[in-house]
Image: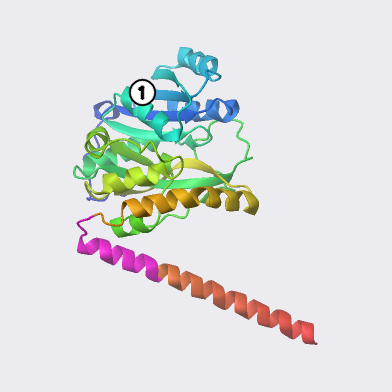
Amino acid sequence: MPCFPNGPVEMVEPAALPACTLVIRTTGRRAQTLSQAIRSALRQDIPRMQIVVVEDGGRAAESLVKGLAGEAAQNLVYLSIPAAGRSQAANAGLAAATGDFIGFLDDDDMLLPSHCEVLARALMAAPDAPAAFAGWYEVGRDADFPDVPSTGAQDWRLGSRRPFSRPGLLLANLFPIQAVLFRRAAWLQAGGFSPDLEALEDWDFWLRLSQIGLFASVDATTSVCRVAKDAEEAVRRTTDHASARQAILARYADAEFTIQGSEVQVLHADLANRLEEFFTAGALVGALWRVVLRNFRR
């Protein structure tokens, strides 16, 4: 069972949960994974669902989406916009969203069926939270899925999840975009995605949402994220993000945040754990290297 941040919450019937919208951005180039992403959205355990697929430039995905819409009981909407980039595609999806709670799903990631229900309940349990997030699995980009998964497979690895604090979020993006569900009211207050960002646009959005309040955290794993399959791709991705990271850090250099004492404690404990992991790993590597040297000298 998920562990809600503010203690027990009345477990209302799913039909009483607020309506949710999932926005899926695509360029129409990944038909197979887009189909899986949409199907995972259609399988959400929540009755009032809207799914908005926004194609950024072209209409390559239109027939796929409309074919799935014909099979779906949920409200599945297709939008095509002139090529404008990731942030503008996100804003087009937000403009079409009708749900009280909204989330994003990349066209190569997937959600487990409990995702929206678990996070919606967390938001209901924490009425001051602008958003809620859960854990995620990570798989390689070339991982094959014969069907939309309902539970985690043994060879999936858990994402490197860190506890939420606003100081921690200022240091780094704490979660992939599909792991979060946020309130429509919070988006309207914070504003949409920054059109000048073509990478890490979600991090910038989370930072603005965090100025409204603390994110709720759910002790559950509800989504699947594809990640770089090799070191070369990881390095290339890091390089691509470097300029966006600098722009975002400069944007918030003079920002004023009201930080709670509990957040400082969370960040302190998290940094202490990271240092312990670093030195423990270093000690293990050092010990192994000494064994190798001893054997080499014999």
Who's the residue at 50% across and 40% down the image?
151
Whether residue 52 sits left or right of residue 262 in the image: it is: right
Q: Quadrant of the C terminus?
A: bottom right
With respect to residue 197, does 236 lie above or below? Answer: below
x%, y% of residue 7?
23, 50
Outermost residue toward the top in this view: 70
| SS for dot 1 | strand
Give the residue pinned by disc 1.
50
Q: Magenta stretch: residue 56 in it? A: no
Magenta-colored stretch includes residue 271: yes
Res. 259 image quadrant: bottom left
> In the image, is residue 167 above or below residue 243?
below
Q: Which residues are magenta?
A: 256-272
Is the magenta region chiefly helix, strand or loop?
A: helix
Total numbered labels placed on residues in the image: 1
Q: Residue furthest bottom?
A: 298
Q: Disc 1 residue type?
A: Gln
Q: Residue at x 34, y 56 (%)?
A: 170
